[in-house]
Amino acid sequence: MERILLVEPNYRNKYPPIGLMKISSYFKSRNDFVEFRKGLMPQKQVESFDKVFITTLFTFDFDICIDTIRYYAEIIGMKNVYVGGIASSIMPENFEKKIPGIQILKGQLTSSKMLGYNDDINIDIMPLDYDILWDIDYEYPAADSYFVYTSRGCPRKCSFCAVKTLEPVFYECKNIKRQIEQVDEQFGPKKQLLIMDNNALNSENLEENINILVDLGFGINNNTIKKNNCMKYYLQSLFKRIEDVKQYTYLLDRIKKEFREIKKTRISNCDRKYIENIQGMISNEDDSTFISFLKENQSYVVEFYEKYHYHKVKRYVDFNQGLDARLFTVERAELLSRIALKPCRIAFDDIKTKEEYFEAMNMALEAGIYHFSNYLLYNFKDKPADLWNRLYLNVDFCEKNPQVKSLFSFPMKYASIEHTDRSYVGKYWNKKFLRSINIILNVTSGVVAREKDFFIRAYGENEDEFISILTMPSDFIRYRDYFEKNGLIDKWKLAYRKLSNECKEELLTMLSESTNEHDLFYEKHDISLDNVLRYYCIQKKKFEKNKSYYVKTLDLHVK
Amino acid sequence: MYSSVGAGILNIVTESLYDKPIVVFREYIQNAADALSNVPDSCDVKELAAHIWIENNNLCFLDNGTGIEEEKFIERMTEIANSSKVKAKNMGYKGIGRLSGMSYCKKLTFINILDYSNNKVQVYTINVEKYNTIQKTDDFIGMTIEELMKKIGEYSSEIDKYMFDFLMQKRDLFTNRNTGFLVILEDISSVLKSTINDDSFIERLSWLLPVPFKEDLLLHDEFGELFASLTKKENDNRLCSIPARGFAIYYQNELLNRPIDVSMFRALVCKNNFGKYAIGVNTFSNHKIEIEKKNNFSGIRIYIDNILLCDENELIPALHNYGLIPHGLYETIQTVKGIGAIIYITDKVNISANARRTFIEITDSNSIEFIELLAEFVNSIYEARYALSKYFNAVKKNDDDLVKIETLKDKALKSLEVLTSDEIVLAEEVKPNSFEEMSKTERQRAVKSKISQIFNEFLKKYMSQTEDYDFDSCFNDFVVWLNANNK
């Protein structure tokens, strides 16, 4: 029996490490001991493992990946450390340069031979082992989901996309039913179905896949299920861990949390007494007493939660990577409308694909799909005005089609895969604009909603106004209402409009090059920028402390 | 005219305007200084002095100035807010200061020395205890100030032995002088006593009163001329008064001087103008603007007639209230404490103190212009503090970006230039190549600081990469990580 440690560097991410979950299933099928960690594990514990598998994700998290790999290699030797995942597959040379001798598992793990095992198992199609997520404290926001593939690869070779490197060949998986059923058997039903295909519409088996999804309870009319009884699976895992002498601290914490969060108004008097006893035990007794109790009363606890989670939940299908507008047809739209698709994500990466995008939207709408979302790539070859137009066209589409129930736009900033940080700036963009976009998006958690009046307020009435908003002092963007009410935004606008085009360019250059725009006014600058630069000194916090100082200074200056 | 004024005015004057015990010293010395200033030029200045002393719980103020004209004495003593002094010429001109002692004693006596050698005096006594009793009665309501003064004040042309003894104690003052004025606060209150008994009292008094600079300072090779220039009227006609006119003021027979000496100066000592309204001297570092704990020449003190009007604790909140300070109140106060500055108001026609003498009267465009200049000065100190810090941090970190260094240097110089008209040179000693020239202790300190900085950066990075700790071996785990990532 080998002892296998799976590691994800301690970056923040939404989705659990699917690759490691598959590797876990492979090793567990061999009866090996598997444990998962996020970040670094203390040296003494690491020493007890034979092999460490480290995943990597975004290229901009390169540094933390390098540090993590080196740490584990220092303890158990480079030959026992395996690195895989997206970042190391996209830029293996960078990793090799930093860590000579590193073992990188590029692309998909289609055979266990890649790990030196002769059983030749396709690890890539192994079920996901959700149990490893209970080894750690970190909560993945999207953990309560199925992650399935109906196909891998993509026939398109878009220059901004890494799929052509990661999954160079397009093929059908044909095991979607099995993927979902395995999860149900081992961990109970999940709430969302995330279909991770890069180009699902390219599949020849779309109809078959849709039928399977409908049969599995993801159809437009059969997507209601009883809430999963997690406790059942928690307890199974807990007792298995105790048997295998595996750490269970975080899992036990989850179990305790479940008990603590019980709403007593929802349970019978008889159960209440019992639950209060358990809650008292959690607070006052040691873990071994609590675990013994759980062992003795496992069936009661599971039954209790079965009753407690009596309510039903609706679950939805999400083609998480977006659908290719150019591959939409009336037939395909009708097929999609048969499943509980929410939202229908369609990529709108380039303004040039406007017609295809709206044709697809119309087809979907005609077919009865009313929840939409899109991905809008920016900071690539596009211009800022293109982003405004794409956002506006979506808002306008909603206005013209009131049957649309929701439409969220997700502007996605392009980060070049050659960069190991997030510093890439597209040809027509600059750092100031990128910062400003971030500020605007932060207000709405990264999405742009359908309401036109809100959109116009946040992004401007036209492209010029959008550029003007992006150029505004950061705090003016962040606290628009506040600075509009006190008239400072109008004053800034007046000063900005008076600038010649050359001066506007000069201003943008200064703002882009500066890491702290509040100080710019005090640095060397063209005198003609004086009028507008002084507004960049203003920070809301300081302004609130002494409004009259700023208002007075600015008034004097404006006069 | 005053008969129409109610007796309650006395309460406002004594309790509201003079709520800090130390102001008693300011008020009586101000009157003394005015009397000394009125002595004809033919008299030898060296013979003019004011004495403050405390004896048997009585506080005395004596000067050998001109005193009050005999026929005007009673009128002066019984009137309120009807001074004959001229605003531009005299220090006090509101005619209320002499009553400031009422809150702090049981009896207040004024002795106008008309002819010292012949014991010719005029005495006016205010019975404060009686005043306190009347104040509580119903009769007080509706009583005019004239009626009140008749009840609590008493005039006499003779002095008792007790007062005579007081005068005799300081007979040296009257060797060549024959007039003067004595104020006695009898049986002073515990509040005033505790102020006097405070360890820092003489230091406070020396900053407050119109005392001269120390002789050593005025004779100093480098700075003597600068400080001496403040004690003379400049040729500029716009200036109405001598900025730092000092008087020989003794406390318990010790001559008081402004407590400034050369050891308190930071790297630069500069003179600066506040338009036509004031002139100042300030000292600041060309390296770091930070508080020097044992240096009392810190913060900003504003003087009018060489008497302390306010310091940064009153100035900054006032500027803040007028909307002239962009940064936080506390932070700005702390910042200005990093320099030492004295500002002398010289244009007494346009700028005057408020009734409480805690700040200037803001009444017209001149006073507004003046406080704007003060705010500009305060804001410059703030800017300088951060500009210096940014520049020297960049130099210390050996930043390779020369353009950035130059920009920061430029900004630092610019910010300091606002504090002075002199040419500024930034400190050199912190440049990194000076390590070889450092002493052993300095090297240790520099090395310790560098290691600690790097260590902290690594530790921060390490902590962000792990959430799984073993308390017993945590340091070892960190070292493993450090080794792995620093080969």
Image: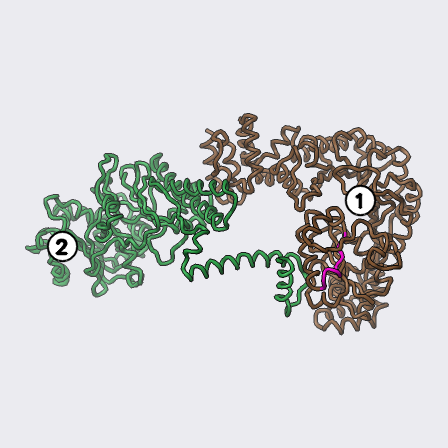
Tag 2 subunit: B
Residue topped by disc 2: B156
* Picture colour for chain A: brown
Residue B424, how many percent across, how many down?
A: 36, 42
Residue topped by disc 1: A320
User: Element type at marker 2?
Assistant: strand
Q: Residue at x 59, y 59 (%)?
A: B459
Q: Is residue A231 visible?
A: yes
User: Which image quarter is the C terminus of chain B in?
Assistant: bottom right
Q: Which mark is residue B30?
A: none
Residue B468, how many percent across, how many down?
A: 68, 63
- Of A462 and A26, nearer the camera is A26
- Of B131 and B326, nearer the camera is B326
Figure quadrant of residue B321 = top left
Q: How is the image coloured?
A: by chain
Residue B191, how many percent across, how many down?
A: 31, 61
Q: Residue at x 46, y 61 (%)?
A: B444
- Find the magenta span and give its range: A76-84
- Of A66 and A367, nearer the camera is A66
Vertical placement of A461 versus B193: above or below?
above
**Chain letter corresponding to the colour green:** B
User: Which image quarter is the N terminus of chain B in?
Assistant: top left
Q: Name which residue type carries label 2.
A: Ser
